[in-house]
Image (cartoon, rainbow, N blue to C red):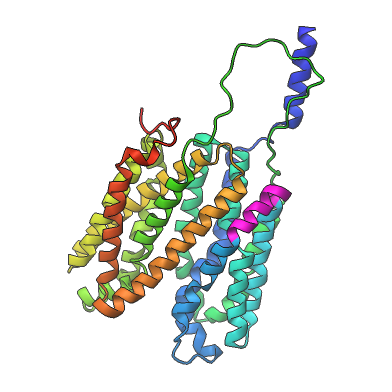
Amino acid sequence: MTTATSEARLAGNSAGSRPEFGRRQVHAVAACYFVASFAALGLPPYLTAILPELGDKTAQWAGLLYIVPTVFGGLGAPLWGRIADRFGRKRLLLRAQLGLAVSFLLAGWADSLATFTAALVLQGILGGTFAASNGYLAAALEGPGLSKALTLMQGSARAALVFAPIVVGSLSPWLSPHRQYALLAVLPLAAAVMLTALPEPRTAPAPDKTVPEEPESPEPQAAAPATPLNALYAFEFAFVFSTVISFPYLISLIEDRIPGISPVASGMLFALPHLSYLVFAMQVHKAFQSRPRLGIALGFGFIALGLAGHGVAHSLAAFIAVRLLLGAGLTLGLVCLSMLAADCAKGRPPGGMFGSLEFVSKAGAVAAGVAAAAGNSFFGPAAPVLTGTAVALATVLAAALPALFRRSPRIRWSR
């Protein structure tokens, strides 16, 4: 009887457990996100070259159109996440890739500013590949495996942010950035084809009550979500705001402080924090896996130091130093936020959670863009980095206060 019961239980677990999901599958999801992100991240910096072809001779709408996909992507992410929890994460991830392909094709063949704007709106509404990919991974993995996968996904985003503008610029002599939208639509299509080979993550079904269970030693119940979502969302918003606010006017700040600097050098300085993430992310994950709160506090501290340094840097060596400081903060923050997100995903529908997290992230980016534009207009190109410094310092204090997390006694911040 005991043997039969054990065999029945093993059979039930084998039939209903999650499909095997290992390193190859995680790398496939990250690679699909990387190739699909090329147009989304590589072409917006060239809006000032695209818009004159569509009738906006001075590219006065470039700033607004830059954030259009971000705004609509943030608005649509929670809804798509909840739909994914109901109808399947793989289906919705495929939908996001195909949605990007459709919007890129429309943008590439647009012959008016109105049509191009509509394509960017569709890109935001129909895209959302990052949130969809994270929700898919969270349905298949948990704990350290999930946090490591989310760290790899951020690496894909950083790599696309670094290399996509270079590729677009290299192709520009032969094909205008506007028409490259249509060409690069093949990348999310290719990603969708690759994703069809991946399994659909499934949670384990309820145990079969018709099979009597033998008495077993007491086991701990499934862990409830350990990290309160409000803490994760607050840190995500502050992190995105304090880092993104330095992006729009960084090149003009560098050119103002170092007259005659080459565009290549300016671009390398812009990319340096993201390159730091690509080099050190996995080492940081290993070092702070059991103490993400410390990593977040240190991350915001480095961000504050780095941004404050931007305000006083007047040489190439000084800018390299402050960009490396910012890179340390960027790496610590992104990696440790991935750990908190993995902790939050325990016991929660992953699609809805990561969709809401994407909404908060997009809101932080939009708020940063507005604040950067206002600060630059009234106080000059150093104002955005000083605003980011203030937000990062305030978040360091918040991260150091245990009271934020007393609602959740289960959380383990340190060994």
What residue is drawn where x is 70% and y is 31%? Answer: 17
80 within the magenta span = yes
- Horizontal and vertical percent position of residue 142: 56, 36
Does residue 262 appear in this view?
no
From this viewpoint, is residue 176 visible? yes
Image quadrant in which the N terminus is located = top right
Residue 58 percent across, percent down from the top left? 44, 90
Q: Is residue 292 left or right of residue 359?
A: left
Q: Nearer the viewer, residue 146 or 345?
A: 345
Residue 19 in which image quadrant? top right
Reply above or below: 57 against 47: below
Q: Tell me if 204 is positioned left or right of 404 in this view.
A: right
In the displayed image of the protein, which residue is found farthest to the right? 210
On the image, the x and y values in percent for residue 287 come to: 36, 36
Return the residue nearer the eye: 290 or 101.
290
Residue 38 is situated, as x and y percent measured from the top left of the image, at 54, 65
Q: Quadrant of residue 35?
A: bottom right
